[in-house]
Amino acid sequence: VLELAYRCPDCEPLTKLALTPDRDLVKCRICSQERALRQDAWQDGGITHCVVCGTEDLYSQKDFPQGLGLAILVAGFGLSSLFWLWYMPIAAFGVLIASVIVDAILYALVPDVVICYRCLSQYRGNGSNPSGRYRNFDLAVGERYRQERMRVEELRRQRQSQDPCA
Ligand SMILES: [Zn+2]
Ligand SMILES: [Zn+2]
């Protein structure tokens, strides 16, 4: 199953749904705004571009909260320092090594999530990254789309201030 987590331009929370080639609409669970989905993105059961905004720029990353891996290492290091202070060097090394191992295991077990640079839609599961075509986050590409999002946001603000009823 391929799952789409859709980020409505007006709402922060994600709307999650099972994505199939025949689905042509996504509806925000907060504001009920509907958006048409592209059905030309499918090829051999995978997606070749974002079904929401159509861009081919998507990136892949590990699907766990950002900073969790680092937090485990930092916690391990902190605990290890305590054992060191308590004159328990074996426990100190043990904790340090254990935290590195846990981190490595987590990294290996946790699946990937594919994210659209432009609209930040997320894709999980079968077909989200056919033949590994989507690579890790690229700073230059990410920056380009971040600036595009800021311009779009700016335009929307201008429109709203000109016409308060819009
Ligand atoms: Zn919404
Ligand atoms: Zn997109």
Image: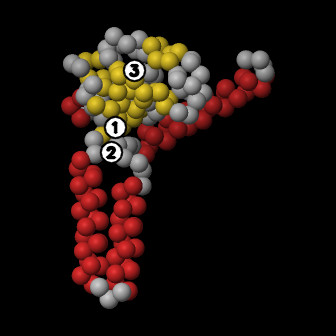
Which residue is label 3 attached to? 51
Earlier sequence position, callout 1 versus callout 3: 3
Mark 1 in CB contact with mark 3 (< 8 angstroms): no
Label annotation for residue 62: 2
Q: Dot 1: what SS?
A: strand
Q: What type is the residue that disc 2 sits on?
A: Lys
Label 1, label 2: how far apart the Cα atoms are: 6 Å
52 horizontally vs 135: left or right? right
**Marking on residue 38:** none
What secondary structure is found at the residue carrying circle 3? loop
Figure coloring: secondary structure
Residue 147 sits in which quadrant? top right
Q: Quadrant of the N terminus?
A: top left
The residue that disc 1 covers is 113
Percent coordinates x, y for residue 41 in the rendering = 33, 18
Q: Nearer the viewer, residue 49 or 139?
A: 49
